[in-house]
Amino acid sequence: MVTIGHGRMGPADTGGTPSFARVVPPLPPPTGAVVQVSSEPELQAALQRLASNTTVVLAPGTYRLTSTLWINGSFADVGIRGATANADDVVLAGPGMTRAAYGRVPFGIWTGGDVQRVTIANLTIRDVFHHPIIFNAGTQSPHVYNVHLVDAGQQFIKSNPDEAGGGVNDGVVEYSVIEYTETAKDAYTNGIDVHRGANWIIRRNLFRNIVSPPGHLAGPAVLMWNRSRDTLTEGNTFLNCARGIAYGLEQRADGFDHTGGIIRNNVFFRASTQPGDAGIIISQSPGTEVVNNTVYVSRTYGTPIEYRFPGAHDVVLANNLLDGVIWARDGATGIERNNVAGARPETFVNAAAGDLHLAASATEAIDRRVTLASVIDDWDGQLRPHGVGYDIGADE
């Protein structure tokens, strides 16, 4: 196993700057053919000869891309992986997120046509003018695992629909780090942006500094919209992002922007020096559950969890812990129960440093005896309950 720079802070962590180092379980070895490469020309050649049931494995090093890595055609069970479990050992480098003269490298990895079950794992992609990873309709069941994405010109992971209304379904993004070293170049950015996708799972990732230059508002770090449905977003960490998770974005006259899905056990922290919007937003997404999340925006925004518009009906918001209030706005309706609003810094181990584990004195949240069938563990992966009842928020 290896640790990546986000996540697990055990009960012994009682102050200081949190480590955000989560243990990443190793992927099983690739099945089928394995092609070993150690240079950028070898990598490009391997993808040009790619066949189904083949994984391209990259030796440690920096691969300065001369072209986008295209996976375009009819393939099943293919992959691109770093040779080690450390994502930073293999770096796919573009010409720069602000360099308009990007040549043949508008993207990092591009898939389309008929690509079934593609795995991208154990590597870093950085400094790309548009998207480090882009999945186009015709791709199904993509898996992004232990990937570090840095400084994208637009969305870090983009999933596009086709003209017939189909999208990329059954995607999984997990144990990855998505971040800007400073800020995006403008407001047109998201960590993950999925159009018309069904049954995506986004879990145990770190989204850091998904923000725009002063005077601009970055898009949500996780945006599932344009008729997407049944997304599960759980166990993620959001540090100093302008917005966190959005199921739906727009008020549509012709239907819902997202349907169903669950948002649970996520931790959202924003410092008082970073302006932004809500940490969790439900827009035109009926039947969505928002449960056991901790959202602390350092009073930069009064309603850290919002549900919006008449299409957001039958929404369930339960067991959430936040330092503002929940707002049902613009005609949204739902059930709110057992949420704790107005959380104070002393509720947490070290709120100023972003450590939002519950302090022992947080009696308003600990052992509140509220059980939800859909929540069996917490942000740390620890089983619930610990004590006589469930705790409010992401930490048990």
Image: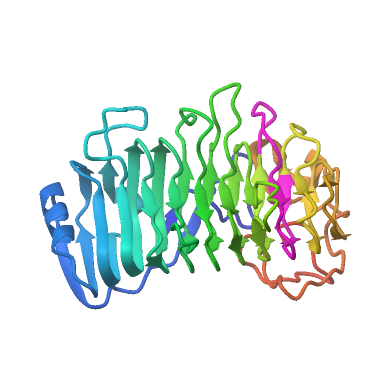
Q: Main secondary structure of the magenta part?
A: loop
Q: Report whether 142 appears left or right of 231.
A: left
The quadrant of the image that shows the N terminus is bottom left
Query: In the rendering, at what x and y percent does residue 122 appear?
Result: 34, 57
Q: Report whether 233 appears left or right of 302.
A: left
- Looking at the picture, the colour scheme in use is rainbow
Where residue 292 sits, quadrant-wise, is bottom right
Magenta-highlighted residues: 270-295
Residues 217 and 203: in front is: 217
Query: What residue is at 31 percent from the left and 28 percent from the top?
Result: 100
Q: Residue furthest top?
A: 215
> Please, is residue 384 above or below residue 95 in the view?
below
Query: In the rendering, at what x and y percent does residue 355 appear?
Result: 66, 45
Total residue callouts: 0
> Please, is residue 159 above or below residue 113 in the view?
above
Where residue 9 sits, quadrant-wise, is bottom right
Query: What residue is at 18 percent from the left and 59 percent from the top?
Result: 47
Q: Tell me if I can see residue 14 in this picture.
A: no
